[in-house]
């Protein structure tokens, strides 16, 4: 049985207007849709960064935050964050906290594929060993928060645009919210 992931489409004000199959949404004309991004911390306060699998449609092979995804219709964000963390990283999360409810961005990757999302940003914690799903994550690293801040400043081109753009608003990364 194949699972079809559905995304919530939004109007310019962020109001839901319908749904679409995720596989059909990320194109050169990607409509605005709902997503989320999460930074996962371990017991030592390090943050998990992941490198996207080369098979990903957008930004393949690029380093990014811990986990991203799309909540389904009528799915609570915390449930979606937990679901994607299990699927992508094989971990359970706790202490999920919304750090930027208003983050949104539009970015175009080298192939011309567009990401266009209202993408609230979360932090969470785990004590689990990361077991990445190779269809989602090709590498991962636990890094000191100061080192991630330095990477965002020094090499933004090596990181996902949603990580770079949201860093200024995430308290964990030295942002103002």
Image: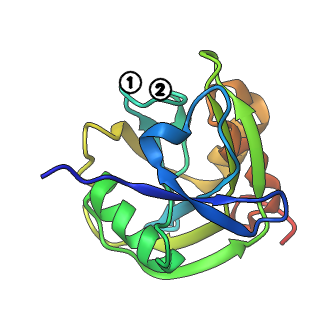
- Give the quadrant of residue 43: bottom left
Disc ID at residue 60: 2
Say few, some or many: other residues with alpha carbon within 10 Å of mark 2 (under 14 / 14 to 19 / 20 or more).
some
Kindly state the secondary structure of the residue where label 2 is placed: loop
Residue found at x 55% / y 42%: 64
Q: Position of residue 107 (x, y in %)?
A: 73, 34
Seen as rendered, the residue at the extreme top is 111
Q: Between residues 165 and 10, which one lies in front from this camera angle?
A: 10
Residue found at x 49% / y 78%: 74
Q: Position of residue 55 (x, y in %)?
A: 36, 26
Kindly state the secondary structure of the residue where label 1 is placed: loop
| One can see residue 13 in this view | yes
Q: Give the CA separation, mark 2 to mark 1.
A: 4 Å
Residue found at x 64% / y 16%: 110
Up the image or down, 113 lies above or below 100; here it is: above
Q: Which residue is mark 1?
A: 54
Question: Of the residues under marks 2 and 1, which one precedes in the sequence?
Answer: 1
Q: Between residues 139 and 33, which one lies in front from this camera angle?
A: 33
Relative to 128, 170 lies left or right: right
Residue found at x 74% / y 63%: 170
Up the image or down, 76 lies above or below 168; here it is: below
Seen as rendered, the residue at the extreme bottom is 95
| One can see residue 48 in this view | no
Q: Position of residue 98 (x, y in %)?
A: 65, 77
**Residues at discs 2 and 1 in contact (Cβ within 8 Å):** yes
Q: Position of residue 2 (x, y in %)?
A: 19, 49
């Amino acid at each position: 049985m194949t699972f079809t992931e559905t995304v919530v489409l939004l109007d310019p004000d962020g109001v839901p207007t319908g749904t679409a199959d995720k596989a059909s949404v990320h194109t050169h004309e990607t409509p605005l849709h709902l997503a989320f991004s999460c930074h996962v911390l371990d017991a030592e306060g390090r943050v998990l960064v992941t490198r996207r699998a080369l098979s990903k449609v957008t930004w393949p092979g690029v380093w990014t935050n811990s986990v991203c995804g799309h909540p389904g219709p009528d799915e609570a964000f915390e449930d979606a964050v937990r679901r994607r963390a299990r699927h992508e990283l094989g971990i359970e999360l706790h202490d999920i906290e919304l750090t930027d409810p208003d983050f949104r961005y539009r970015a175009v990757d080298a192939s011309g594929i567009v990401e266009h999302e209202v993408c609230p940003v979360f932090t969470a914690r785990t004590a689990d060993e990361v077991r990445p799903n190779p269809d989602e994550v090709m590498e991962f690293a636990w890094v000191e928060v100061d080192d991630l801040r330095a990477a965002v400043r020094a090499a933004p081109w090596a990181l996902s645009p949603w990580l770079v753009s949201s860093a200024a608003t995430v308290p964990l990364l030295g942002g103002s919210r």
